Amino acid sequence: LNGTFVHSGDMKGKRLVDSVLELKVDLMRAGSVAFEYKVDSERRWDGLYFMVDGETKMQMESYEFQYESMAFPLAQGYHTLQWIYHKDVAYEMGEDRASVRSIQVLGTKYNTETCFSCPK
């Protein structure tokens, strides 16, 4: 996903909907997840959450027109990462959409400690 973006879909006219992007990772060592996001929705009622293993790490963001960066540490092991756009039952405001881009997960494999000659 690095260099492109995904978005929550067309939420116009929809009521009480969650759009979820889920990524499961297995970290061989402690690492982190970093991403950029932007949101245009009804303030305080609709918005984007970020969760790790069912725990909210980023509270709902409803009104962020420019891409903002976030990063969170991750322990070694299996993790479920979720970006959730929540649309409530009431009003439509703005684009009613969240976009996420540049997802980077560090810790998924060890660096090579041995140098090898370049092929000729």
Image (cartoon, rainbow, N blue to C red):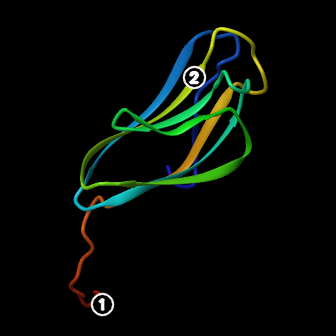
Q: Residue at 78% of width from left, 21% of height from top?
A: 93
Relative placement, left or right, of 78 versus 3 is: left
The spot of residue 15 in percent (x, y) is 62, 9
Relative placement, left or right, of 88 versus 34 is: right
* Whether residue 104 is visible: no
In the image, residue 74 sits, relative to residue 29, either above or below, namely above
Q: Residue at 56% of width from left, 36% of height from top?
A: 59
Q: Which residue is mark 2?
A: 86
Q: Which residue is mark 1?
A: 120
Q: CA distance from mark 1 to mark 2?
A: 54 Å
Q: Nearer the viewer, residue 70 or 8?
A: 70
Helix or strand or loop: what does disc 2 sit on?
Answer: strand
In the image, residue 68 sits, relative to residue 88, either above or below, namely below
Residue type at numbered disc 2: His
Neighbour tally class for label 2: few under 14, some 14-19, many 20 plus, Cα within 10 Å: many
Q: Nearer the viewer, mark 1 or mark 2?
A: 2
**Which quadrant of the figure contains the C terminus?**
bottom left
Residue type at numbered disc 1: Lys
